Amino acid sequence: MPEKEEGIELRQYWEVLWRHKWIVLLAVVVVFVGTMIFTYRQPSVYKAQSKVLINPPPSLYPYTVPGQIVASQGLPYAQDLPYYINYLENYRVWLTGETMMDKIIERVKSLYPKSEEIPFSMGVSVIRDTSIFNLEIESSDPELCKVAANATAQ
């Protein structure tokens, strides 16, 4: 008998929905139109990326001579890895610090005068197991994104 009760309960739900189908349809249309209006009113956001290779200091390679190719493909020896990771993280923090950001903004202003009116944001991350930084610039102006990414990379 429990199966029959469950079937009746589902049938009752369906009957209520079918009886009020215009209200349900109207609610769906209102939500859809509202979402479309909201989406089209949002400003476009552009993103530019730049990758920068950071050469580690020679102190991370105590057993090599200048110009020698290291078998670890640019990564330091295992015993120096914690220092190396700190080095990259310190470099990332320095790059996103207030002093460096002021220099980057000044450089962008000199290359792209319209940038004073248009804000942009910058994110810096270290690509895992490499000595490469990924710089990401976001703005509502695609040209500003390009100029800011190149200025930061230089």
Image (cartoon, rainbow, N blue to C red):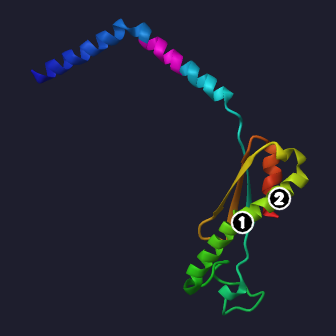
In depth, the one of 24 and 91 nearer the eye is 91
Q: What residue is rendered at 25% in x and 14% in y? A: 11
> Which of the 4 image quadrants contains residue 91?
bottom right
Of the image marks 1 and 2, the number of the one nearer the N terminus: 1
Picture quarter with the C terminus: bottom right
- Give the x, y percent position of residue 28: 48, 17
Picture quarter with the N terminus: top left
Q: What residue is rendered at 60% in x and 70% in y? A: 129
Which of discs 1 and 2 lies nearer the camera? The answer is 1
Residues drawn in magenta: 24-31
Q: What predominant SS class does the magenta segment belong to? A: helix
Specify the label residue 68 is tagged with: none
Residue 1, compared with residue 127, is above or below; it is above
- Give the x, y percent position of residue 62: 66, 92
Residue 88, compared with residue 40, is above or below; it is below
Q: Which residue is mark 2?
A: 151
In this rendering, position of residue 55 left or right of residue 10 = right
Alpha carbon distance from label 1 to label 2 = 12 Å
Q: Would you say residue 28 sits in the magenta stretch?
A: yes
In this rendering, position of residue 67 left or right of residue 94 = right
- Give the x, y percent position of residue 50: 75, 58
In depth, the one of 57 and 72 nearer the eye is 57
Q: What residue is rendered at 65% in x and 83% in y? A: 71
Specify the label residue 95 is tagged with: 1
Q: Residues within 10 Å of mark 1 (few under 14, many from 20)?
A: some
Hey, what amino acid is under mark 1?
Leu
Q: Would you say residue 27 sits in the magenta stretch?
A: yes
